[in-house]
Amino acid sequence: MFRLATAALMAGLFLLAGSTRTDAGKFNKVLKIGDSAPTFTGLEGVDGKKIGLSDLKDQKVVVVCVTCNTCPMSVAYEDRMITLMKKWNGKGVRMVAVNCNVKTGEENSLKAMKTRARGKGFNFAYVADPSQKVGLAYGATRTPEFFVLGKDRKIVYMGALDDDELPEDAKVNYVDLAIQAALAGKAPAVTETAARGCGVPYSDD
């Protein structure tokens, strides 16, 4: 089911108009590997606290995930995100999941985000980005889409979490391997993949 949905979604790939760089990545049209991660500040989380990239300066690696409450692919990946952070929480790694879909209705409101995070037991920060500036700055076009930032806050990996939307068929966790490489001060073997999921509904405002 997810394969069919993904095929249909990929057919209508959303490109960020006016934001394309000629030296950008293979799949990401805004950033390339080695770029400094776009900063962000004051994003309100489901815990009632506001967070910015500078607040994570004590972390060796930061994972930014552009996601939402309602995309079937995002929902399907929540358990894998929780499992990943069970492995890395407390080891100098932090994930910040950013919902850029907050203009799409109540089901992606901060209130709904709090309900979902509490019900699923999210062990990572889940924050709202009503301005959509984070998603745009990172060149995210899909939910979920992942960005691994090294110690120097440069991008070492961007794209999908793993190599298959079905958990039983997934063999390679790209984000996990990128975290391991970044902690070791090395580049991961795979630095960029095509993200899978729903198109991010950016506002024209």
Image: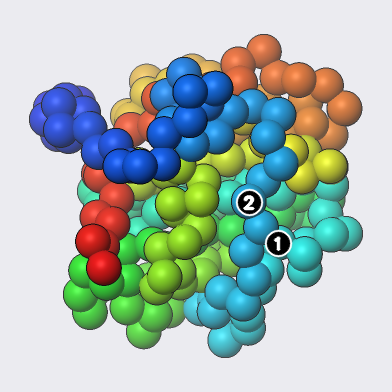
Residue 165 relative to residue 124: left or right: left
Please name the amino acid that badge 2 sits on: Pro
Question: Mark 2 falls on what kind of element?
Answer: loop
Q: Residue 167: in sight, yes or no? A: no
Residue 153 in picture, x, y percent from top left: 77, 45
**Residue 11 location, quadrant:** top left
Q: Are marks 2 and 1 in contact (CB under 8 Å)?
A: no
Q: Nearer the viewer, mark 2 or mark 1?
A: 2
**Residue 68 location, quadrant:** bottom left
Residue 149 in picture, x, y percent from top left: 70, 41
Question: Mark 1 falls on what kind of element?
Answer: helix
At x 61%, y 21%, the residue is 191
The disc placed on residue 53 is 1
Residue 102 in picture, x, y percent from top left: 32, 71
Residue 155 relative to residue 28: left or right: right
Please name the amino acid that badge 1 sits on: Leu
Q: Earlier in the sequence, mark 2 or mark 1?
A: 2
- The local crowd at label 1, few if under 14, some if 14 to 19, many if 20 or more residues have their Cα within 10 Å, is some
Q: Quadrant of the C terminus?
A: bottom left
Toward the viewer: 94 or 35?
A: 35
At x 70%, y 19%, the residue is 188
User: CA separation, marks 2 and 1?
Assistant: 9 Å
Whether 9 is drawn above or below 137: the answer is above
At x 52%, y 67%, the residue is 126
Residue occupied by mark 2: 38
At x 15%, y 33%, the residue is 12
Whether 42 is drawn above or below 184: the answer is below
